């Protein structure tokens, strides 16, 4: 029976992967050709405006950046060192959707600041490249092609030398927006603008706006009121698919965690009470963070059972709102406010599978540690707490091999890391 269910589960995962891959509209992929377009505002540069093409005389490193993004800020010394080492062989440009005033203040405080910053107010960069998380890096060669979408760990001198060679393989193809030829490019841009990272589902968009306000420090009371005043029929009717449910509830969980702990950090001293108290009103019903995580997103699982036990009698409301199928990747998306929690991203129902794949890879890459001498692999504590969600230890090993985090030929012993419960807010990746 278990074998049959496992085969069925694998089939559904594979089917979902291919379906989502066919329907998704991601940004520029590796080997995609980029066009040229105007840039209205450039800070810390010789000119206040320009075009994308003018940065591509050298190998171009585009870094999607936010002053609120801790990993983005921590990466600046690495980018500075790379620029110093490669000098005129590479260009590095930061792209941000934040206000000009905020970016200028950030630059002033860090003088000398070594990079031009594109103020992407019209979201042309974001629309075309569609960064699923921050920091997000794109390598574009002089040949006008995307050469790589590296992680911060991949920004090494060896890789840059490799990309410098790759960009010489083909000649540049630059689209001039002043000629009659850019019609196809403009249509591509228009299509992407119509499918931006703002969800078409009004409730998912509400959850996005809520968490964005929490991130930027804007007023969140209006969003809390909107969520409270939702009708239950409206909530159930708008969240029909699992993709819609996951995007909405993950965003909402992370937003409420951030807002609550910013307003009263002392609540974190009694974590069991913090997660278990029904302090969140949604559509006229009171929920706890545990209700959202274990009831809705984990499909009525008992919290402390390693994922093996389901609730015997889940409530009617929980049954109406919960996902149809548990997705282990939610554990790499939910942020509980602790230092060991995954960074917060902004999820859309249209692109959530791609986003969760990236979140999974990024978190595991930062947490997994394989010791070749002892053939032992250290895994995050959350994989221990909810081990059945991951399919047990054998499936964990398979996942690590699929992500190339351990050698394919090895069968290492598993040990789990301890969890750092130090309060750590503003841990955003998007």
Image (cartoon, rainbow, N blue to C red):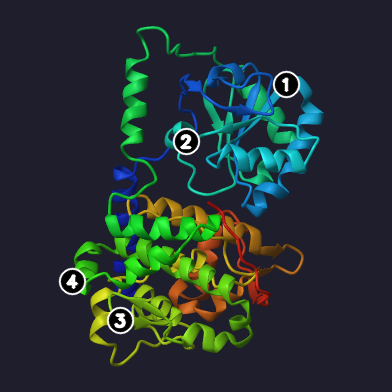
The answer to whether residue 155 of the structure is visible from this angle is no
Please identify, in this view, whether the residue under mark 4 or under mark 2 is nearer the observer: 4
Q: Residue furthest bottom?
A: 312
Residue designated by label 4: 233
Q: Secondary structure under badge 4? A: helix
- Sequence-first disc among 4 and 2: 2
> Please, is residue 187 above or below residue 419 in the view?
above
Q: Residues within 10 Å of mark 3 (few under 14, many from 20)?
A: some
Residue designated by label 2: 129
Tell whether label 3 touches label 2 (CB within 8 Å).
no
Please identify, in this view, whether the residue under mark 4 or under mark 1 is nearer the observer: 4
Q: CA distance from mark 4 to mark 1?
A: 58 Å
Relative to 161, 26 lies left or right: left
* Residue at 35% across, 83% down: 286
Q: CA distance from mark 2 to mark 3?
A: 39 Å
Q: CA distance from mark 1 to mark 3?
A: 59 Å
Please identify, in this view, whether the residue under mark 2 or under mark 3 is nearer the observer: 3
Q: Secondary structure under badge 1? A: helix
Residue 89 marker: 1
Q: Position of residue 323 (x, y in %)?
A: 30, 71
Q: CA distance from mark 4 to mark 3?
A: 12 Å
* Residue at 62% across, 52% down: 68
- Sequence-first disc among 4 and 1: 1
* Residue at 34% across, 26% down: 188
Tell whether label 3 touches label 1 (CB within 8 Å).
no
Q: Position of residue 315 (x, y in %)?
A: 27, 87
Residue 285 marker: 3
The answer to whether residue 184 of the structure is visible from this angle is yes
Relative to 307, 409 lies left or right: right
Tell whether label 1 touches label 4 (CB within 8 Å).
no
């Amino acid at each position: 029976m278990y074998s049959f269910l496992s085969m069925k589960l694998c089939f559904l995962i594979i089917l979902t992967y291919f379906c989502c891959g066919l329907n998704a509209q991601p940004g520029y992929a590796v080997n995609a050709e980029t066009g040229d377009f105007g840039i209205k505002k450039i800070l810390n540069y010789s000119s206040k405006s320009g075009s994308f093409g003018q940065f591509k005389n050298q190998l171009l490193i585009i870094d999607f950046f936010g002053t609120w993004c801790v990993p983005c800020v921590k990466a600046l010394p690495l980018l500075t060192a790379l620029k110093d080492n490669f000098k005129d062989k590479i260009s590095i440009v930061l792209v941000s959707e934040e206000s000009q005033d905020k970016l200028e203040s950030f630059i002033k405080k860090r003088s000398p600041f070594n990079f031009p910053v594109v103020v992407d107010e019209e979201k042309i960069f974001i629309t075309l490249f569609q960064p699923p998380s921050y920091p997000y890096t794109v390598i574009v060669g002089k040949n006008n092609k995307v050469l790589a979408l590296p992680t911060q760990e991949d920004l090494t001198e060896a890789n840059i030398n490799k990309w410098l060679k790759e960009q010489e393989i083909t000649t540049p193809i630059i689209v001039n927006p002043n000629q009659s030829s850019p019609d196809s490019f403009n249509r591509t841009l228009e299509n992407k603008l119509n499918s931006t990272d703002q969800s078409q589902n009004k409730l998912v968009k509400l959850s996005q706006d809520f968490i964005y306000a929490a991130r930027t420090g804007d007023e969140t009371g209006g969003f809390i009121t909107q969520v409270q005043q939702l009708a239950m029929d409206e909530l159930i009717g708008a969240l029909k698919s699992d993709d819609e449910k996951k995007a909405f509830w993950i965003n909402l969980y992370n937003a409420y965690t951030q807002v609550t702990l910013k307003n009263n950090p002392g609540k974190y001293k009694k974590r069991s009470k913090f997660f278990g108290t029904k302090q969140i009103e949604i559509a006229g019903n009171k929920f706890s963070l545990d209700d959202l995580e274990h009831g809705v997103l984990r499909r009525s699982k008992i919290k402390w059972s390693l994922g093996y036990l389901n609730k015997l009698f889940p409530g009617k409301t929980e049954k109406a709102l919960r996902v149809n199928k548990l997705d282990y990747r939610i554990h790499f998306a939910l942020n509980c406010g602790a230092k060991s929690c995954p960074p917060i991203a902004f999820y859309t129902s249209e692109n959530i599978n791609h986003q969760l794949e990236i979140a999974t890879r990024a978190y595991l890459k930062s947490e997994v540690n394989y010791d070749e001498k002892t053939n032992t692999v250290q895994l995050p504590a959350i994989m221990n707490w909810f081990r059945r969600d991951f399919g047990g230890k054998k499936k964990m090993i398979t996942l690590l091999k699929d992500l190339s985090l351990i050698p394919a030929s090895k069968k290492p012993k598993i040990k789990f890391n301890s969890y750092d419960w130090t309060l750590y807010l503003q841990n955003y990746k998007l």
